[in-house]
């Protein structure tokens, strides 16, 4: 059982349980084996996306003079340094997820607001880079690999894994850009408009988790993100098969 530091049940576990329950209420899982296989094919995309997202934060903060990520072993692409098991489960069942947050010390930055903004956007930029590189790689595979390979079980599995890497990283990119605390988008907006100087900033930030969960539960995030994710993926797919 995963508990918070004060000994209480981690609320994210309750969210994941509720998401699973809602899936069954809406019709359940008609083919459990196919569902498990589908989730396993998503695993590389989740590991790569979450790990490199947090690595992006760590490497940029380090380059800007902050020794904290390096001292904590976060300037690495090793998934063991970045993966939060609960965050992976959330991405599996709830459609959103997170890694272990990279701790930074902005007092080391020469231009604090600018550098905090750069660190905030570094994670989503890493997800975008993954999308671009995987799309290019998949285009080469589609156009250069023999049709016998593409039509084989191995070829189809490889295609689906790479396709999932693209989709998952598009989702992570747009989800983290939402201007809701504690997401990167809110940190970026905070630095651009210097929101921390306002009296409502602290109450908003401290209740950000609850606000985010409510947006997810009522599918507001889905309404906002699905057209963006679908649109970007269509562009990528057109490039792959074009």
Image (cartoon, rainbow, N blue to C red):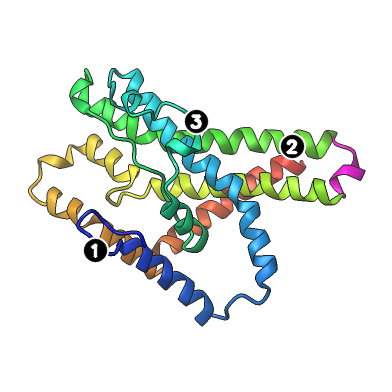
**Disc 3 from disc 2: Cα separation:** 25 Å
**The C terminus is located in which quarter?**
top right
**Disc 1 from disc 3: Cα separation:** 32 Å
Q: Position of residue 18 (x, y in %)?
A: 41, 72
Looking at marks 2 and 1 on the same chain, the residue that comes earlier in the sequence is marked by 1
Q: Position of residue 209 (x, y in %)?
A: 27, 57
As drawn, the label of residue 8 is 1
Q: Residue at x 14, y 48 (%)?
A: 201
Vertical order, 199 against 6 (above or below): above
Label 2 packing within 10 angstroms: few (<14), some (14-19), many (20+): some
Numbered disc 3: secondary structure: loop
In the rendered image, residue 150 lying in the magenta stretch gets the answer yes
In the rendered image, residue 110 lying in the magenta stretch gets the answer no
Q: Residue at x 64, y 43 (%)?
A: 236
Numbered disc 1: secondary structure: loop
Pointers 1 and 3 in contact (C-beta within 8 Å):
no
Per the rendered image, the range of residues in magenta is 145-151
13 with respect to 77 (left or right): left
Numbered disc 2: secondary structure: helix
Q: Residue at x 21, y 25 (%)?
A: 112
Q: Nearer the viewer, mark 1 or mark 3?
A: 1
Residue denoted by label 3: 77
Q: Position of residue 203 (x, y in %)?
A: 13, 54
């Amino acid at each position: 059982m995963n508990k918070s530091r004060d000994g209480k049940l981690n609320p994210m576990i309750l969210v994941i349980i509720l998401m699973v329950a809602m899936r069954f209420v809406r019709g359940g899982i008609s083919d459990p084996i196919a569902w498990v296989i589908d989730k396993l094919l998503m695993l590389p995309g989740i590991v790569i996306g979450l790990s490199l997202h947090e690595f992006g934060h760590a490497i940029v903060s380090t380059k800007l003079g902050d020794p904290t990520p390096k001292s904590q072993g976060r300037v690495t692409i090793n998934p063991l340094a970045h993966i939060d098991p609960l965050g992976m489960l959330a991405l599996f069942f709830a459609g959103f997820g997170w890694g272990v947050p990279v701790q930074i010390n902005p007092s080391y930055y020469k231009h604090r607001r600018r550098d905090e903004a750069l660190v905030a956007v570094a994670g989503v930029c890493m997800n975008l880079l993954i999308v671009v590189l995987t799309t290019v790689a998949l285009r080469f595979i589609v156009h250069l690999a023999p049709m016998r390979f593409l039509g084989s079980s191995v070829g189809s599995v490889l295609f689906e894994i790479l396709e999932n890497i693209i989709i998952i990283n598009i989702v992570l990119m747009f989800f983290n850009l939402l201007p809701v605390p504690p997401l990167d988008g809110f940190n970026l907006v905070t630095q651009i408009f210097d929101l921390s100087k306002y009296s409502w900033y602290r109450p908003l930030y401290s209740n950000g988790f609850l606000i985010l969960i409510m947006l997810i539960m009522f599918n507001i995030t889905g309404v906002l993100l699905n057209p963006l994710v679908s649109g970007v993926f269509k562009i990528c797919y057109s490039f792959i098969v074009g």
